Image: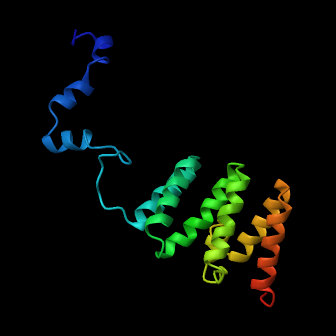
Amino acid sequence: WLSNPRMARRRPWGLLAIISASPAAWAVAHATPPGSASESPVETAESLWTESLRRESVGQRGRAIELQERLVRTMSIHPLAKIALYRIGANYQALALYEQAADSFERFATLYPAELGRECSADVRRAQACPDARDALDIAISLRLALGDDDRASADLRLFQRTYRFQR
């Protein structure tokens, strides 16, 4: 069997590699997958944020929203939490879940009214990841009008005028 060139290509090297693997390689191969219930590493804001961006980049926006919501819920005072809240609205909007997007943008504008994106770099602005409360409220107003929710759009407009009347 091993001397036949055609059969030699079909050798079960994968099984042989697993059988002869070192204990360390075996442990890595059988480690608990990320995100499983039995996983217990300490999550950091940076790890949640990085994983959410990775999920966004591969089109898994629902999973990205879950990670960003966990970041906002568990580490709300971290600087990445406000960016995550803004991205939640953008992800809902990308998924055409406009009601949830408007809610997220309104929540961002209410919690962080002074966040005007002034400290964002040009690269972050081009990637549309720079949180700006005025933009968030403007998007929320547009979404509310598109959804036919004139009362909430009017309330958002009044909030916008009251908060940003003299700012440019």
Q: Is residue 73 above or below residue 64?
A: below
Q: Nearer the viewer, residue 57 or 22?
A: 57
- Quick one: quadrant of the N terminus? top left
Left or right: 71, with 93 as reference point: left
| Residue 90 in which image quadrant | bottom right
| Residue 74 in which image quadrant | bottom left
| Residue 45 in which image quadrant | bottom left
| Residue in the image at 73% along x and 54% along y | 98
Left or right: 28, with 105 as reference point: left
Q: Is residue 110 above or below residue 68?
A: below
- Residue 79 in percent (x, y) is at 50, 76
Which residue of the protein is positioned furthest toward the front in this rendering?
151
- Residue 145 in percent (x, y) is at 85, 60
- Quick one: quadrant of the C terminus? bottom right
| Residue in the image at 42% along x and 66% along y | 46
| Residue in the image at 82% along x and 54% along y | 147
Q: Nearer the viewer, residue 83 or 150?
A: 150
Left or right: 138, with 67 as reference point: right
- Residue 94 in percent (x, y) is at 69, 52
